[in-house]
Image: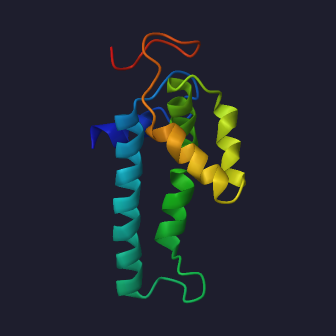
Amino acid sequence: MNWYLGVLKKYVDFSGRARRKEYWMFVWFNILISIVLAAVEYATGLADAESGIGPLSGLYSLAVLLPSIAVAVRRLHDTSRSGWWLLLGFIPLIGALVLLVFMVLDGTPGSNEHGPNPKE
C-alpha cells in the first residue's frame, strides 16, 4: 500500500526514476480498486448499461490519470528512455507491447541522466 500512496504523493513529479516494483505495485492496486468499484456499481445499479462505467469508476480513473502518467514516465527514465516514449501507446497493439517490454525491463544500473538508481 505504501507504493501506491507514494506514487499518489508524487502525482506531478515527472522527473527522477521509478523502480519496477513501484510501477507494478501501483498498477496492481489500480486494478484491484477498479474491480471493487465496478462490483459496487453493478451491485447498486450505478453502472451504465451501454458503457459499463459508473460514476465511481469514472471519477477514480480521472483521479489517477496524472499519477499514472507520472509513474510511467519515471519508469521509462529508469530504463534510460525519455518520457516521450509513452506516446507509443497510441499505436494500436504494437505500441502497447513495446511499452510493456520497457516497463518489465530492469533499470539502468548506477546513475543515468535522470538521476541516481532508486535501488541503491
Q: Position of residue 81 (x, y in %)?
A: 61, 27
Which quarter of the figure is the C terminus placed in?
top left
Left or right: 116 in relation to 4: right
Q: Position of residue 100 (x, y in %)?
A: 52, 47
In percent of the image, x 34 and y 36: which residue is there?
21
Residue 98 vs 119, above or below: the answer is below
Residue 115 vs 85, above or below: the answer is above
In percent of the image, x 65 and y 27: which residue is there?
82
In percent of the image, x 46 and y 83: which residue is there?
46
- Which of the pair 72/67 is nearer the observer? 72
Which quarter of the figure is the N terminus placed in?
top left
Q: How is the image coloured?
A: rainbow
Q: Position of residue 55 (x, y in %)?
A: 52, 73
Left or right: 25 in relation to 55: left
In percent of the image, x 33 and y 38: which residue is there?
3
* Furthest residue in direction left, as rendered: 1
Residue 85 vs 64, above or below: the answer is above
Q: Position of residue 110 (x, y in %)?
A: 43, 10
The total number of labels drawn is 0
- Which of the pair 116/53 is nearer the observer? 116
